[in-house]
Image: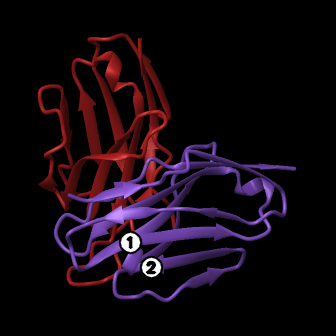
Amino acid sequence: AQKVTQAQTEISVVEKEDVTLDCVYETRDTTYYLFWYKQPPSGELVFLIRRNSFDEQNEISGRYSWNFQKSTSSFNFTITASQVVDSAVYFCALSEATGRRALTFGSGTRLQVQP
Amino acid sequence: EAGVAQSPRYKIIEKRQSVAFWCNPISGHATLYWYQQILGQGPKLLIQFQNNGVVDDSQLPKDRFSAERLKGVDSTLKIQPAKLEDSAVYLCASSLRQIASSTDTQYFGPGTRLTVL
């Protein structure tokens, strides 16, 4: 069975601080996808990134960066120079590469960025 | 391009009443998902459709929940009768689902927040 663990329930930082959200996953599949979604107070889940299990290259997109380490089954997300608009709940998720492809979500990390 | 549409956005009902939610996926998306998100938790899959066929409904409480996607486009999710523990946000998502393709990202609608009193 697949499992995603986000051990940090809530993180509070001051604007311009860097913050890292942790994600650890379990799967028996050799091919899978990892995702991060953002859920602002409006409630809609916003897609941020998809990474497949064959691609361990880190990725940077503006102030966002992701560190995928297959050896430790982790897919961590860093926001550099955080802003108040980054305040949201962030979910890490996992899906099979074939078959169902439904997402297994972690429990989420609530990030509060104080001005 | 229009996103995933859901209605209503909010619904309050008494326990034992029935309720229905509607979802219109992104145009051309073959796969449609319904997730239930209880407060403080991540979304959990209820049912997955590929076109108008059910791929996975193993987590759907079939004694009270039903869903359909008759023409392979819009979908409705129904609860009858509702229980207190059904209070949650019901999220609809869709994906292109290109067979043998590596690109299959799910895009979510705004959700329907259900409160059962």
Could you give the CA–CA distance between mark 1 and mark 2, rounded to whole angstroms? 6 Å
Q: Which mark is residue A73?
A: 1
Q: Colour of chain B?
A: red
Q: Colour of chain A?
A: purple
Vertical side of B91 occupied by B10: above or below: above
The location of residue B113, given as percent across then percent down, is 47, 32
The location of residue B97, given as percent across then percent down, is 27, 72
The location of residue A3, given as percent across then percent down, is 31, 56
Label 2: element kind: strand
Vertical side of B32 occupied by B111: above or below: above
Residue A48: image quadrant is bottom right
The chain holding disc 1 is: A
Residue for badge 2: A69
Assign the N terminus of chain A to one quadrant of the image.
bottom left
Q: How many marks?
A: 2
The kind of residue on which mark 1 rests is Ser
The location of residue A56, given as percent across then percent down, is 44, 86
Q: Are marks 1 and 2 in contact (CB under 8 Å)?
A: yes
Mark 1 is surrounded, within 10 Å at the Cα level, by few (under 14), some (14 to 19) or many (20 or more) other residues, namely some
The kind of residue on which mark 2 rests is Gln
Residue drawn 20% across and 40% down? B67
The chain holding disc 2 is: A
Residue drawn 40% across and 45% down? B91
Which of these two is toward me, A83 or A78?
A78
